[in-house]
Image (cartoon, coloured by chain):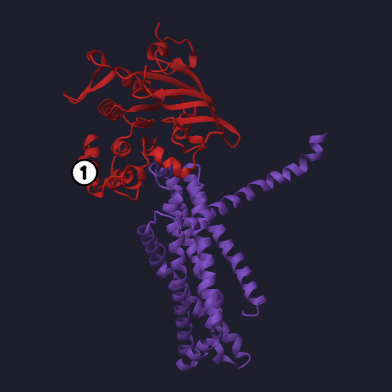
Amino acid sequence: MVASEFGEPACLLDLLKEPVLDVQEFVVLAGRAFRNIFRKPHYFDDVILQMDRIGVGSLIVVALVGLFSGIVMALQMSRALSQYGEVEKTGTLVAITLARELGPVLTAIMMAGRNSSGIASELGSMKVTEQIDAMRALGTDPIQKLVTPRLLATCFMLPLLTIIADFVGLFGGWVISVAKLHLGSRLYWNSAWQALEWNDVAQGGLIKPLVFAVVVSLIGCFYGLRTTGGTQGVGRSTTQAMVAATIMIFITDAMITEFFVSQGTS
Amino acid sequence: MAEAGAPSVLRFENVSVSFDGEAVLTDVSFEAFEGESRVILGAAGSGKTVLLKTALGLIRPDSGRVLVFGQDLSKMREAQLFDIRSRIGMLFQESALFDSLNIAENVAYPLLNQKSIRCPKSEVQGRVEEALDFVELGGTLDKFPSELSGGMRRRAAIARAVVTAPPLVLYDSPSAGLDPITAHTIMALLIKERDMAQTTTILVTYRYQDGNLMANFRYNSKQGRLEPARHWDGPLPRTTFMVLREGRLIFEGNQDRLESTADDYISKFCKRRE
């Protein structure tokens, strides 16, 4: 009788136990990864290698996404603005939308698709083939050697990629403005430039990309390092990392935007 | 069971390990002494690999103590364990060579990363070449693990395990998945390492032939090959057999006792002596 009376809450607690433990494990991993930034040994070679893989390797994809989002934004916004006879404000809207939201979010999503999953599959393969254990056996902390360099490299590269995506997006908007909307180049660039404030640059070019970089790199590492179950497990971790990173990008984006809006600066 | 005067190298005291509530090792106790060879037999899933990883401090026991060179691993932090691990060589079951490094870099890894080894950088190349020559892989320095066969990868992993000349070497199923000729070559290398470097050896395997070779053969350095131990006049390393079944240690003793046992499970590993 007692068991049945308390069975339901106990079952609910069991359901909650796993996600709570996952969050705890993630926080511990993040804490150790950040702490290792200030601890020796430092694996600078690995940071440079990861910057090349994560940053330079993503450049073309990010530029393409930026270009086409700029083009689409210009097309859609000009259509809406034409109803109010304000087509010349196309540059303003493209600049604000790209700098505040689309630039950082789309770049981070591309990074989640390319790098969270890549990191998870690389570390997951190392885990199931005992290379992580071998690393520990041979005197290396896997978090120091594998996680911290990826975290640092993503934090360096994601803001840079976001700025590149923003500029290429603005370029895409300019192409449409000049070729299709027949606006002057000077008008487009002036309205785009004047629309941007330092706050937009800080929010969309630095704060959001940095937070997204932490999300993208640490979620990839987290799922990679807890991989079990052979090659099937690697596939599972890869998918989970990408999905979780994408969802977390949107959640953190909403939180940061809400913060800036409530401060009256957005 | 203590060897006369030989210090204890590895000691398990009532060690239990479980994963997600499922017992993997239950109340395991044994002690290995300097210069001794231990052959741990058991079927797949009997806890052999977990036992080795616990001995290396990669897995912490739920209860009991693990003492390596007299130091209790269960109370140490990960950073403190690195010093102990630098005195232990480990061959992992699937070799566990780093895919992104070539063979020379893999073998050099413990020399460059284990703080307590303190190998001058100028000596690293020489020691790597020496270790690879030992396993007869001298020409593979620039190759990557994916370019080598399974047996060659295993040999490269042995070179990485012994390049720091550790006094204790753990081998996890070194002959698993290899053809008989390659498996014999690998076992010959293990015996060569044991006899030339006088190491304490813990060998985990499901193949009784491996234990038989370990117990009854020695490496003749003059002739460069294995020979039956009965042809040798000098002192021989003692070989103790252990059998694990579902995480429990069900047998510990020498080969004669192992072959005389009436236990059905143990008899599946070795030919019962009538």
Chain B, which colour? Answer: red
Q: Residue at the far top: name it.
A: B274
Q: What element carries label 1?
A: helix
The picture places residue B107, in percent across and down from the top left corner, at 29, 43
Q: Where is residue A239 in the image (x, y as percent from the top left)?
A: 52, 54
**Circle 1 Cα neighbour tier, 10 Å, few/some/many (<14 / 14–19 / ≥20):** few
Q: Can residue A54 be seen in this view?
A: yes
Between A48 and A227, the one nearer to me in the picture:
A48
Q: Is residue A233 above or below residue B70?
A: below
Query: Eyeballing the image, is A175 above or below B226?
Result: below
Number of numbered discs overlaid on the protein picture: 1
Front residue of this view, candidates B29 and A251: B29
Where is mark 1, residue-wise? Answer: B126
Query: Image point 73% across, 46% down: which residue?
Result: A12
Quarter the N terminus of chain B occupies: top left
Q: Does residue A98 appear anywhere in the picture?
A: no
Report which colour depicts chain A: purple
Q: Which of B231 and A76 lies nearest the eye of the viewer?
A: B231
**Chain for mark 1?**
B
Q: Quarter-wise, where is residue B118 in the image?
A: top left
Quadrant where the C terminus of chain B sits is: top left
Residue placed furthest toward the front: B5
Q: Which amino acid does label 1 sit on?
A: Gly
Where does the image place residue A5, in percent across and percent down from the top left? 82, 39
The answer to which image quadrant residue B202 occupies is top left
Q: What residue appears at the point 74 percent right and 42 percent down from the top-left corner? A: A10
Could you say where residue A265 lies in the image, as x and y percent from the top left?
A: 62, 80
Residue B72 as seen in the image, left or right of residue B256: right
The image quadrant of residue A100 is bottom right
